Image: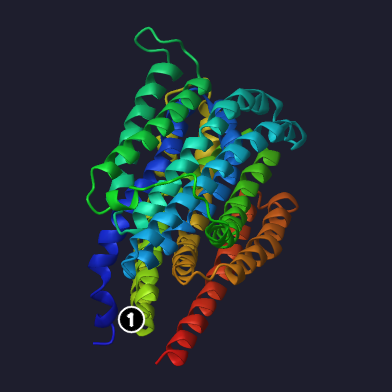
């Protein structure tokens, strides 16, 4: 009977989370499609895309992390039926996200030469440099889209960003096919073709989502009287105070995974390609946790607006339970299919690269064993973060993520990966350690705050 008070929320949690999951998987699927299609060219090309995307993911984490500030503000306004407050939160959030996208693009161009000083294979860096230019530009529309998505999520309208992402993926895969391999008279551009596909699809994604917004009766009132001339410092500060710590949270987490790419690059091209395969697979299951995290953020934000703190805690715990059950299933899948999944990424009939491909598959299958175990920690920590963001508590969680990933996880990854014979396995053991520490202490934080709210607001 006690369990039933949580399980009865599962269907609505999934209803909110499912479109978010598909939408986030769509972002990951862009990288997945690039990896699959570029992987047919060879392991060096795959490693180059991995290296280029490692820079992109670090920058993207800051933009996406900052944009999450919009959801709890809009969800709270929606719970209180405050259309003007929701409109103001979106407008100021969109403005700041656009500026951040432009800044990130500029920083990536400046940071490009760092690749030559990171002890990476020279042939990989030479291929990654021009790829990075185009994909860096695509960050601008991506961060704008993310601001729009977070606004839509805050209104519990989670399906529209999913539709836009599906359209973007169709465009990306089509352009990849035409431009990577030079089909139907198009030039054969290799990994540059993949970058062009990503760039074009992300601009289309923004335009299509705005079109969907203007056709929705619940969303449209928030977009009328959208006056850019009226900018309030107070609201800019409110969004920034939530957005900057949230950006750092995601930066710290994405940063530790990016460090795994760089550390594996020190080990060689094949370990780096294997790391990319395992990381790409893990990131797809992680998006399920992200979707449930958004559900927690929306529902906690709504209850905060209603000031019903007992219900807030019950609903949040229901999301945590659902996340745990789903992540256990993913962990079992990784264990059972660890030898088959890496073969999807490489051409096993390529006799020229047969030895390299087989080595990559063996290493990746080993990494998936570790990935199976951190599925649970990873899913739970992002669900806890979502609930805390719904409470608009971001500063302490930021400190927790920094300590867990960079004072615990990274030193373990570095030592075991580069100073012992464990190699890539050692790197991923460090990832598992950081994620587990983060999950434990983020739960403690939510437990403390939710109980405090109930006691002080009977």
State the image coordinates of residue 230 (x, y, percent, origin top left).
Answer: 49, 49
Q: Residue furthest top?
A: 185
Residue linked to disc 1: 311
Establish if 279 lies above or below 237.
above
Identify the residue shown where x is 57% and y is 75%. Answer: 441
State the image coordinates of residue 358 (x, y, percent, origin top left).
Answer: 51, 34
State the image coordinates of residue 297 (x, y, percent, origin top left).
Answer: 41, 65
* Disc 1 residue crowd, few under 14, some 14–19, many 20+, Cα 10 Å: some
Location of residue 236 (image quadrant): bottom right
Identify the residue shown where x is 26% and y is 69%. Answer: 10
Identify the residue shown where x is 29% and y is 46%. Answer: 160
| Image quadrant where one finds the N terminus | bottom left
Give left or right: position of 165 versus 238.
left
| Image quadrant where one finds the C terminus | bottom left
Establish if 283 lies above or below 179.
below
Establish if 373 lies above or below 307.
above
Establish if 136 lies above or below 232.
above
């Amino acid at each position: 009977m006690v369990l039933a008070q949580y399980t009865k929320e599962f269907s609505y949690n999934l209803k909110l989370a499912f479109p978010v999951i598909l939408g986030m998987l769509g972002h990951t699927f862009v990288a997945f499609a690039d990896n699959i299609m570029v992987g047919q060219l060879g392991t060096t090309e795959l490693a180059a895309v991995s290296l280029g995307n490692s820079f992109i993911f670090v920058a993207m984490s800051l933009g996406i992390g900052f944009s999450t500030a919009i959801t709890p503000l809009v969800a709270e306004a929606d719970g209180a039926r405050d259309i003007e407050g929701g409109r103001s939160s979106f407008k100021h959030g969109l403005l700041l996200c656009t500026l951040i996208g432009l800044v990130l693009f500029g920083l990536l161009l400046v940071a490009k030469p760092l690749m030559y000083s990171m002890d990476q294979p020279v042939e990989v860096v030479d291929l990654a440099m021009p790829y990075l230019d185009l994909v860096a530009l695509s960050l601008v529309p991506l961060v704008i889209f993310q601001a729009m998505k977070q606004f839509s999520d805050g209104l519990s309208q989670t399906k529209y960003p999913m539709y836009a992402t599906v359209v973007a993926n169709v465009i990306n895969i089509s352009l990849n096919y035409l431009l990577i391999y030079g089909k139907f008279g198009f030039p054969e551009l290799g990994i540059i073709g993949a970058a062009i596909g990503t760039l074009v699809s992300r601009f289309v994604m923004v335009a299509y989502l705005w079109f969907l917004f203007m056709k929705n009766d619940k969303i449209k009132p928030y977009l009328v009287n959208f006056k850019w001339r009226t900018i309030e410092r107070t609201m800019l500060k409110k969004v920034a105070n939530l957005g900057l710590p949230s950006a750092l949270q995601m930066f710290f987490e994405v940063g530790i995974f990016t460090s795994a790419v760089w550390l594996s690059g020190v080990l060689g091209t094949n370990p780096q390609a294997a790391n990319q395969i395992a990381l790409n697979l893990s990131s797809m299951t992680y998006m399920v946790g992200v979707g449930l995290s958004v559900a927690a953020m929306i529902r906690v934000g709504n209850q905060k607006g209603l000031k019903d703190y007992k219900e807030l805690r019950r609903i949040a715990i229901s999301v945590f339970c659902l996340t745990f059950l789903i992540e256990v299933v993913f962990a079992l899948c990784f264990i059972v299919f660890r030898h088959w999944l890496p073969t999807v990424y490489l051409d096993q009939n390529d006799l020229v690269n047969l030895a390299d491909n087989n080595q990559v598959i063996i290493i990746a299958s080993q990494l998936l064993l570790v990935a199976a175990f951190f599925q649970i920690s990873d899913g739970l920590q992002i669900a806890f973060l979502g609930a805390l963001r719904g409470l608009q508590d971001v500063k302490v969680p930021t400190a927790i993520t920094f300590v867990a990933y960079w004072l615990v996880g990274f030193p373990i990854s570095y030592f075991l990966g580069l100073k012992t014979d464990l190699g890539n396995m050692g790197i991923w053991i460090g990832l598992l350690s950081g994620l587990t520490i983060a999950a434990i202490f983020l739960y403690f934080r939510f437990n403390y705050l939710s109980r405090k709210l109930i006691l002080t607001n009977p």
